[in-house]
Image (cartoon, rainbow, N blue to C red):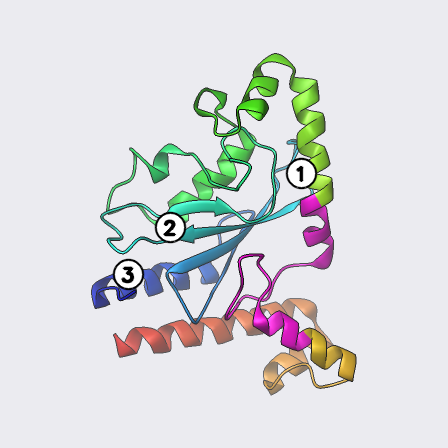
Amino acid sequence: MAYPAAVMKRLAVELSDLVASPPEGIRVLLNEAQLTDVRAEIEGPAGTPFEGGLFQMRLCLPADFPASPPKGLFVTKIFHPNVSTSGDICVNVLKRDWTSETTLRHVLMVIRCLLIQPFPDSALNEEAGKLLLEEYDEYDKRARLMTNIHAMCLAKRGPTPLTASGANAGGTSSADTHAGKKDKEGGAEGSSPTLKKAKSDNPKAAAGAAANSTMAKVKKGLKRL
């Protein structure tokens, strides 16, 4: 699917900004093979049934973006009134409140807020919506169980690399698979000397080096547009 150069430039600028300055509790992953398939990891907010979990999601941009909103989808299973059993997200910012000026940052922040304040009146998961209104303790129990089963394992695994080239619908990238294979074979950690040194010296430095590498690739793409 071909997008106008102006749309790709806007998208590259937004993604670059999200990587450089991520919103609280949100981490955007770049799919270099397809920037229009936006992937993110959302930390379950404290004080909610989703606390401690790490939820992977996608924003799929339509052909007429930004005239039409993206489609939001949770890849990680979640028990929530405004998320269907197949992962579709129901939130006004992706429907009637969408405008061509709405940013991806705003969309992601609203979706995380949805984990704090669900809206059962517009439920896609009617069972979750009914329990939230009538039997909150049971809703809380079910939501925490789903979080423990599906999202806690992701949180324990740690964050996905910033660049997720060729990531599949389950959120695992070809880069992850390749890295795992090299680990088993006792191979090198990567081709970048900067990243190698950062990994051995300081995990935070490694994350910074990865972010800088990703930013450079986005800026390089911008120059071609």
Q: Amino acid at mark 2?
A: Leu
Query: Which residue in the protein does label 1 denote?
Result: 51
Query: Which residue in the protein does label 3 denote?
Result: 10
**Residue 202 relative to residue 86: left or right:** right
Marks 2 and 1 sit apart, C-alpha to C-alpha, by 23 Å
Marks 2 and 3 sit apart, C-alpha to C-alpha, by 11 Å
Question: Residue 200, relative to residue 62: is it above or below?
Answer: below
**Residue 87 relative to residue 150: left or right:** left
Which quarter of the figure is the C terminus placed in?
A: bottom left
Q: Amino acid at mark 1?
A: Glu
For the residue labelled by badge 1, is the local secondary structure a helix, a strand or a loop? loop
Marks 3 and 1 sit apart, C-alpha to C-alpha, by 33 Å
Query: Which residue in the protein does label 2 denote?
Result: 104
Residue 164 sits inside the magenta stretch: yes
- Where is residue 137, by image quadrant? top right
Task: Give the residues in magenta.
Answer: 150-179
Q: Residue visible at 31% across and 45% down? A: 69
Q: Earlier in the sequence, mark 2 or mark 1?
A: 1
Q: Give the x, y percent position of residue 3.
A: 25, 64
**Residue 92 relative to residue 136: left or right:** left
Q: Give the x, y percent position of residue 178.
A: 64, 77
Which quarter of the figure is the N terminus placed in?
A: bottom left
Q: Earlier in the sequence, mark 3 or mark 1?
A: 3
Q: Earlier in the sequence, mark 2 or mark 3?
A: 3
Q: Residue visible at 53% across and 24% down? A: 126
Q: Residue visible at 55% across and 34% down? A: 115
Which of 52 and 2 lies nearest the eye of the viewer?
2
Q: Amino acid at mark 3?
A: Arg
Question: Residue 1, relative to residue 184: is it above or below?
Answer: above
For the residue labelled by badge 3, is the local secondary structure a helix, a strand or a loop? helix
Question: Residue 198, relative to residue 169: is it above or below?
Answer: below
